């Protein structure tokens, strides 16, 4: 099995290599640190699985799923994340990922996840499975799930206590644009203040 790893932390890539090397016949055929390197790497070799970090330095891994599957529709992608599962897992699966696993998972769980997605099946942990069941029963969306990818980025930074200027600098947008996103966030979620956003994010383990 040939695997492509896309993660912007060298120590994470090294750890993944060591785990994957435990399985006979498995190899990390390529590794990249940036989102814009993923598609060129896929074009240059034949892979069986892509392990893709949710938060690459230059672009969200979730945003990369659409162009990746447009060019490689049958390529199974296992999303790797340091974020709380309930916050990101369902979004990744809805965007086309074959599986979702957190970076604190055991080596055994990682190997099981790779095997499952390589076989054309989906992989989620028990916690994610429970969350999917809740979503199926309720049939509605949590406030933060109504936001676009960029709105969510702005929301999380505000919820973490960043000022409008700090958010603008981090996302390379203007302060006026941050204010526009904030207004959209409040319209979609029903929050009426930054304090409500912060409180919601803390309750849901998002910050």
Image (cartoon, rainbow, N blue to C red):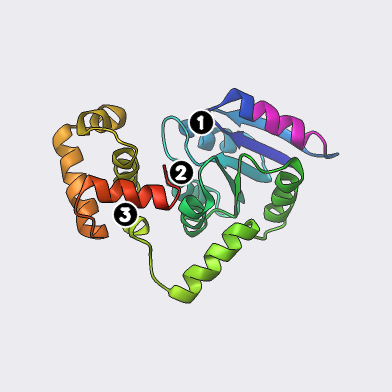
Report if residue 76 lies within the magenta region: no
Above or below residue 194? Residue 192 is below
Between discs 2 and 1, the one toward the N terminus: 1
> Which disc, if any, is residue 64?
2
Q: What element carries label 2?
A: helix
- In percent of width and height, residue 205 lies at 45, 48
Name the residue tied to disc 3: 147
Q: Residue furthest left?
A: 176
Judge from the rendering whether residue 127 lies leftward or rightward of residue 140; answer left or right: right
> Which disc, if any, is residue 8?
none
Above or below residue 72? Residue 178 is above
In this rendering, the count of numbered labels is 3
Judge from the rendering whether residue 200 lies leftward or rightward of residue 84; answer left or right: left
Q: What element carries label 1?
A: helix
- In percent of width and height, residue 124 lies at 62, 57
Magenta: main secondary structure equals: helix
Judge from the rendering whether residue 67 lies leftward or rightward of residue 180; answer left or right: right
**Are the two marked residues, 3 and 1, in contact with CB atoms closer than 8 angstroms?**
no
**Are the two marked residues, 2 and 3, in contact with CB atoms closer than 8 angstroms?**
no
- In percent of width and height, residue 100 lies at 59, 51
Judge from the rendering whether residue 195 lies leftward or rightward of residue 73; answer left or right: left
Report if residue 17 lies within the magenta region: yes
* Highlighted range, magenta: 13-22
Rendered-image quadrant of the C terminus: top left
* Image point (72%, 57%), residue name: 119
**Are the two marked residues, 2 and 1, in contact with CB atoms closer than 8 angstroms?**
no
Q: Mark 2 and mark 1: span between their CA atoms?
A: 11 Å
Mark 1 packing: few (<14 Cα in 10 Å), some, or many (20+)? Answer: few
Which of discs 2 and 3 lies nearer the camera? The answer is 3
Between discs 2 and 3, the one toward the N terminus: 2
Name the residue tied to disc 1: 37
Q: Mark 3 and mark 1: span between their CA atoms?
A: 27 Å
């Amino acid at each position: 099995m040939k695997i492509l790893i896309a993660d912007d932390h060298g120590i994470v890539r090294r750890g993944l290599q060591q785990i994957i090397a435990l399985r006979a016949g498995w190899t990390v055929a390529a590794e990249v640190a940036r989102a814009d390197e993923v598609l060129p790497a896929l074009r240059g070799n034949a892979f069986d699985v892509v392990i893709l970090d949710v938060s690459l330095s230059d672009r969200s891994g979730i945003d990369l799923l659409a162009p990746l599957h447009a060019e490689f529709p049958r390529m199974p992608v296992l999303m790797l994340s340091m974020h709380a599962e309930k916050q990101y897992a369902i979004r990744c699966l809805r965007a086309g990922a074959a599986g979702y696993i957190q970076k604190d998972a055991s080596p055994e769980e990682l190997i099981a996840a790779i095997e499952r997605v390589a076989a054309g099946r989906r992989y989620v942990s028990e916690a994610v499975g429970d969350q999917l069941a809740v979503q199926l029963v309720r049939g509605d969306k949590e406030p933060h799930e109504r936001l676009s990818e960029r709105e969510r980025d702005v929301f999380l930074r505000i919820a973490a206590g960043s000022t409008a200027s700090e958010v603008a600098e981090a996302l390379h947008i203007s302060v006026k644009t941050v204010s526009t996103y904030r207004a959209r966030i409040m319209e979609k979620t029903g929050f009426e203040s930054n304090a409500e956003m912060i409180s919601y994010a803390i309750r849901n383990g998002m910050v």
